[in-house]
Amino acid sequence: MLLAEEQKKQAWDGNRATPVHLILLKDEFDQVIVPTESHPLPFSSRFTCAPCHDYSIISQGLHFMAASPAATGRPGEPWVWVNEKTGTLLPLSFHKWPGTWHPEEIGLSAWDFTLLFGRHLTGGGIAEPPNAEVTPPSRWNVSGKVEINCLGCHNVSNKQSPSEWAKQILRQNFRWAATAAAGLGEVGGMASRLGPTWDIIDGPNPDDTEWAVPPFVRYDRALFDSKHQAFLDITREPADSRCLSCHSVTPAAMKKYEFDADVHTAAGLRCVSCHRNDLSHAMIRGYEGEKDNNPLLSEDIFTCSGCHLGGDPAGGKKKLAGRLGAPFPRHKGFPAVHFKRLSCTVCHSGPWPENDLTRVRTSRANRLGIYGVARWHTDLPAILQPVYVRDERGKLTPRRLFWPAFWAERKAGKLQPLHPERVLASAGAILHPELGAARILNALTLELDPDEKAVLVLEGKIYELTLDGGLSLSESSAGLQTKELVWAVKKEGSVAPLVPDFDPAAEPLDPDVEAWIFRVLDVLTGLPDAPGKPALLNRDSLYQVVETSVEKSVHPGPPTAAPQLVWLVDGKFHPLIPELEQRTISRLVGTEQTLTEEQVELVLKALSRETGQSDPGEKAAFVYVSGGKMFALDKDGKLDAFDNPAASAVTWPLAHEVRPARQSLGINGCSDCHKVNSPFLFRKARGTGPLQTSRVKVVSAGSFSGLARAYQMFFGLSFAVRPLFKAILFVSILVLGSVVLLLFLLGMARASGLIERSKQE
Amino acid sequence: MTAFRIISIAAGLSLAAFLTYNRFKETGSLKNKPFFPRLTSYFSWLGRAFSRFLKREGWVAARSFYLGWLFCYPRPWQKWTLSGVIFSFIYLAASGFGFSLLSPRGLFGLALLLHVSLGGIFVLGLAVLTVLRAKDYIPFVLPEQSAGSLSSSMKNIPSPLLTSLLFWLFILSGLSLGLTALFSMLPYFAFEAQVDIIGVHRYSGLVALLSAMLLLDQAISRQKS
């Protein structure tokens, strides 16, 4: 009622031009922003846009209702909580969509959710809680709320930066994010470094100008006129790039130049040409049956059929087609059952079905579109498409899928995902296999020349430090063919041992070698969490740093083949990184997986030890889910794999990229889908996940659609003989028709007296 | 689809009632009975006839009728052709009308696959039979006969002419069934035409079924006489 009244108040006058937005910016206290002030506050969309646009109405729009439990129509892409360390890929949704978990079930507060997913949230809704929830423990008072980011979509300026938005959100600079992302000013400081009691009215921190610097904004004064009005280049209909910031989906193996846009885009339409809205921002999603969920629609007029068939779905006499000159589809030769049982997108959307499902990346799940020095996007979750699932109307619809991965505890017989922090706390170093090596490499690199860097050589492969403190597999060859762990130096593509081979019997030891050994051992001594004293073994000699010099002694163990750095702990020698870490690094680094079965086994044991629960097998108290399987410890403490409904793939419909008729299924005839071993029906969906294992769920893509495999194979087989069948039918009809024609002609001859006449003659 | 269902049920039941009622009348038990007792007698006669049919004697009678029919065709391949047409038509009618009337989804799955396959056999066999028997059913060169009248209400139509007309009606509907089946498999017709083609196919099937019922009634009468 309120919505209708407000919309009436703000009725469109019919002018299709966009007004110039030279307006006063206002802060969250509804005060005009004066950019020349010493500490201006960030602008607030709630108060800046309010004089003309009713914020309360807009805030009920689709993009701001991520946390609304209200019916929001057919399922969409869930939010995927990706935690690489714990191998967590958890589909979350507030809408109770099948296969998803409610964030509150996992212990995520609104603030946690905003921090996790705010990078691709539009603000408002869950990111803008009521004032009652703004309490010191929540940190809302420090970060501020994330108001609706109007400019995120409606700003025409190329300065509008989704990357900047994500960066500010991750710094917990929630209330500053919109100002920074729009390029209205430069935002510095990090709310994440501030104590929980800081409030925006406290202003800058005079005691700390280096670390705990409260966020601040320096406006671009050139944007303002003398009356402090700022020019905002606003459009009512956002450009596609704005939508694609959060809604991009691209094949993972495809190069950028190879990508073909949706046929509608190629024809000149924009996203908003179909996905329309009014002030309520109840965006039209465009699926069949949406009219039941969207107050803007009384009919499904913005669906595929709504546009292409117009208001005359049966074809009718006029065949005027629909909006914007959408061509009227003829669908010649298609049995009508296809239109009853398949949605348009089955044949027209997504990639052409190949032998394998197509792996894609999506903006939100794979964190695309956030650019910087570090690599932001993730390869997991592995989203595959398309599988065909029957919707509530009984029509097959193409869907994307991914296999969830998470640690879980069994509660009342049901699996309850564990918060990654809980798993990390229990697992300790098990889930940080590269940490020790990375620390050592980092410390050693600091001792090297600028053009050199320390690397780890393991089983002939080279591992290097990454910018974010992890390890990556080097593309260059080690040149050190040894199975042993070797600490080495990489310079201009060549790799040499960190401690070159030397003759320990030489007396005295080369001063340069001795100095280098001292530096290396000294670096290792200074490492935090060093488990013991560093030492160097070379053949039968042992070198250690004693006070300020290297002391040589006899190595009590078997002689080594080459210099070897070790820890000396309680009189025993240990490699610089434990064997578990070596094994894990060599198996995982350079792959997209983040866990080995050995790690999972150890973590499950750690979790069980903590709680004293040790039921084996399927009923185990703690499990790990990945690749469509549930992993638990058996009675011998070994990892075993089971099927479990919670491990099933989560799916959601896809609609784009739409292919034109000439590239759609059926263009080559029935055998595009109906044939023996048809990829459309029989290709396999193979479970993927963070766990490196061969034990994954493999299901026929056809099983998602509930189609009987044997029947479809038989049916497909029938198309092999169909040309012959048609020929037999044609000849039979020709014979029948000829006889009927003869009878007709005979009757005509009789009626006209021709026969009698000819007999008389 | 709903209209087709209503028309099919109404037409099928009406014709079945008409034909069985005529048979009932031939028993001569109607004389001077008022309407309701006559109706009661009819239904009890129908029940008895149906129950007899389900018993061994019914199957024996059906078998002998079938063999008698085959007897008209001297060569084995002709007998096979006739059998193919009869049994494929029984399945086509049962599956087509069964699914149309009972399943909201219509004909689908294995039943549809079999329907399409047997449809080919039916049309092929029908073409052969038409070539073999057309000369016997030319409506305007029939011999004057009076045996096996259809019913008292249609007794003014000479029986051979009626049979001949029914024969050609069955052939025409079979031709239409074959044509519409073939057209629906060819890539020349747009969606709306496909919908119309299926509609024509359904109604052709109904005409074929009704004419087959009448032909069967004629044949039974002839055998009895």
Image (cartoon, coloured by chain):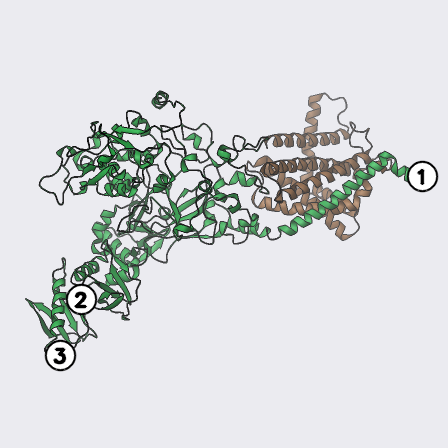
Chain colours: A green, B brown
Front position in the image: A147 or A563:
A147
Q: Earlier in the sequence, mark 3 or mark 1?
A: 3
Identify the residue under disc 1. A760
Q: Which residue is mark 2?
A: A574
State which mark lies toward you, 3 or 2: 3
Q: Secondary structure at mark 1?
A: helix
Q: Give SS at disc 3.
A: loop
Q: Residues within 10 Å of mark 3 (few under 14, many from 20)?
A: few
Q: Please, which chain is the residue tagged with disc 2 on?
A: A
- The label shown at residue A381 is none
Residue A291 is left or right of residue A476, and the answer is: right
Please state the chain letter of the residue tagged with numbered disc 1 in the rendered image.
A
Residue tagged by mark 3? A506
Task: Give the image location of residue A501, x and y in percent.
Answer: 19, 74
Q: Is A141 on the left-hand or right-hand side of A149?
A: left
- Residue at x 71%, y 45% (from the top left corner): A733
**Label 2: few (<14), some (14–19) or many (≥20) C-alpha neighbours in 10 Å:** some
Q: Chain of mark 3?
A: A
Q: Earlier in the sequence, mark 3 or mark 2?
A: 3
The residue drawn where x is 35% and y is 20% is A9
Marks 2, 1: nearer the viewer: 1
Q: Say left or right for A656 vs A583.
A: right
Residue B84 appears in the figure: no
Looking at the rendered image, the quarter that the N terminus of chain A falls into is: top left
